[in-house]
Image (cartoon, rainbow, N blue to C red):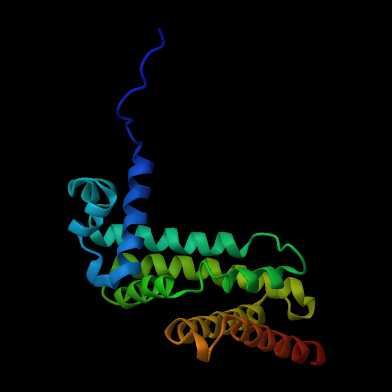
Amino acid sequence: MPKAAPRFTRLSAADRRLMLIEASLDCMAEGGMASFTVDRVCARAGVSRGLVAHHFGSMAGLLAATYAHLYAKSVSASTRPPQDGSRLDGLLEALFDPTQFNRPALNIWLSMWGAIANTPELMAEHRRQYAIYVDLVAEVLAEHTPALGKGQAAQTLARTFISLVDGLSLQHCIDPPSMPASVARKAALDFVLHHIRQTKAA
């Protein structure tokens, strides 16, 4: 007679960390930073309050880990090979994908950004993740336009491009009819192409 399957499965430490991170994202998507409390996050994850301190040290540690997870997902999506076209096309496709370009996602990012100045752990993580992101965008831009090079010019253009995308995302999520995703994507592409033409002409 076959043995009955065990009623309970012991989760690994990595699984429990991920559960808390995903619960944090869900809470912030629904109610911003006001919903990022130990009681709400743990209730959402279905775990005891002590696991936050055990796995992350504090809520600030959990916030930094959640930020790193969120950034890693965005970078991962941005590095997927495009179905058609260049890496620049793939980057724009990923940045304006509806799964990332929406109001719940904006709630999460705004919650994170609003907490950076007062959370040293989050500030340190932001600086690390932002540097990785700038390098990625600069690499894509330099690959698309060899004349741009891979030095300071590409880095500067990457930072400006990221700031533009952040602004377009904000306006789209606040009032979608005033900034449709298709218009936002075209604006970002036009900005890059304009600077590429200037680089080639120099």
Residue nearest the viewer, comparing 155 with 74:
74
Q: Is residue 44 left or right of residue 149?
A: left
Q: Is residue 75 left or right of residue 19?
A: right
Q: Residue at x 49, y 60 (%)?
A: 72
Q: Residue at x 51, y 88 (%)?
A: 177
Where residue 105 sits: x, y (%)?
A: 43, 70
Where residue 161 sits: x, y (%)?
A: 59, 82
Q: Is residue 43 left or right of residue 189?
A: left
Q: Is residue 47 left or right of residue 196?
A: left
- How many numbered marks have been drawn onto this rendered protein structure? 0
Name the quadrant of the C terminus: bottom right
Is residue 76 positioned above or below 14 on the image? below
Is residue 134 positioned above or below 156 on the image? above
Residue nearest the viewer, comparing 84 with 51:
84
Residue nearest the viewer, comparing 159 with 173:
173
Q: Residue at x 33, y 23 (%)?
A: 6
Q: Residue at x 34, y 36 (%)?
A: 11
Name the quadrant of the N terminus: top left
Seen from this angle, which residue lies furthest right?
Answer: 201
Is residue 41 positioned above or below 123 on the image? above
**Residue 112 quadrant:** bottom left
Where residue 85 sits: x, y (%)?
A: 77, 69
**Residue 78 quadrant:** bottom right
**Residue 59 quadrant:** bottom left
Seen from this angle, which residue lies furthest front?
Answer: 1
Where residue 69 sits: x, y (%)?
A: 43, 58
